[in-house]
Image: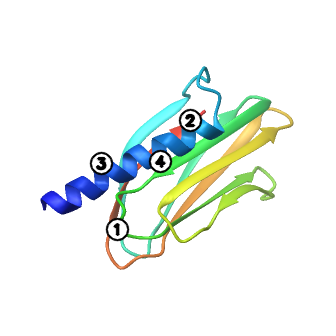
Amino acid sequence: MMRTRARYLTGRLIGISLALTTIDVAAQTLFHRVDQIATHAIDERRWHLTAGYHAITVAGDGDTDLDCYAFDASGTLLAKDDDPTDRCVLGWVQRQPGPVLLRIVNIGRVYNVYELSVY
């Protein structure tokens, strides 16, 4: 249990470090949440975002692979992070205000607790 907690905290710190190197530190967080995704599940979140640069970070607990995809209203892929880790950093320029769909996919055989932030 202690080792899992240490991995979770280490993962969160790595995820935060990645986010800070990608996102302007002065950026305003529009949404922040800690959530859990089941085994082989898909979580979807929707926001209406203004025009301009936006970023999403997902920092998992280190137990599984999480893949992240952002789509606009017409289903066009805006950004993706599908590497073999559970840390996602997505960034794109929103050309006009509109809805954005984030799809988080848990590739692993166990649940994953993740921290989600939208900037």
- Whether residue 109 is visible here, answered yes or no, is yes
- Give the residue at mark 1: 63
Q: Earlier in the sequence, mark 2 or mark 1?
A: 2
Of the numbered discs in the image, which one, if any, rests on residue 20?
2
- Give the residue at mark 4: 15
Task: Confirm or deny contact between disc 3 and disc 1 (CB under 8 A).
Answer: no
Residue 8 quadrant = bottom left
Left or right: where 111 falls relative to 42: left
- Residue positioned most to the top: 26
Q: Amino acid at mark 1?
A: Asp
Q: Earlier in the sequence, mark 2 or mark 4?
A: 4
Q: Earlier in the sequence, mark 3 or mark 1?
A: 3
Q: Quadrant of the N terminus?
A: bottom left
Q: Earlier in the sequence, mark 3 or mark 4?
A: 3
Q: Earlier in the sequence, mark 1 or mark 4?
A: 4
Using the numbered discs, state the Cα–Cα distance from disc 3 to disc 1 in whole angstroms. Answer: 12 Å
Instruction: Check disc 1: other Cα within 10 Å, few if <14, some if 14-19, many if 20+.
Output: some
Using the numbered discs, state the Cα–Cα distance from disc 2 to disc 3 in whole angstroms. Answer: 17 Å
Using the numbered discs, state the Cα–Cα distance from disc 2 to disc 4 in whole angstroms. Answer: 9 Å
> At x 60% / y 50%, what residue is drawn?
89
Left or right: where 93 falls relative to 39: right
Q: Between 16 and 47, which is closer to the camera in this rendering?
A: 16
Using the numbered discs, state the Cα–Cα distance from disc 1 to disc 4 in whole angstroms. Answer: 14 Å
Instruction: Check disc 4: other Cα within 10 Å, few if <14, some if 14-19, many if 20+.
Output: many
Instruction: Check disc 2: other Cα within 10 Å, few if <14, some if 14-19, many if 20+.
Output: some
- Picture layout, residue 33 above or below residue 24: below
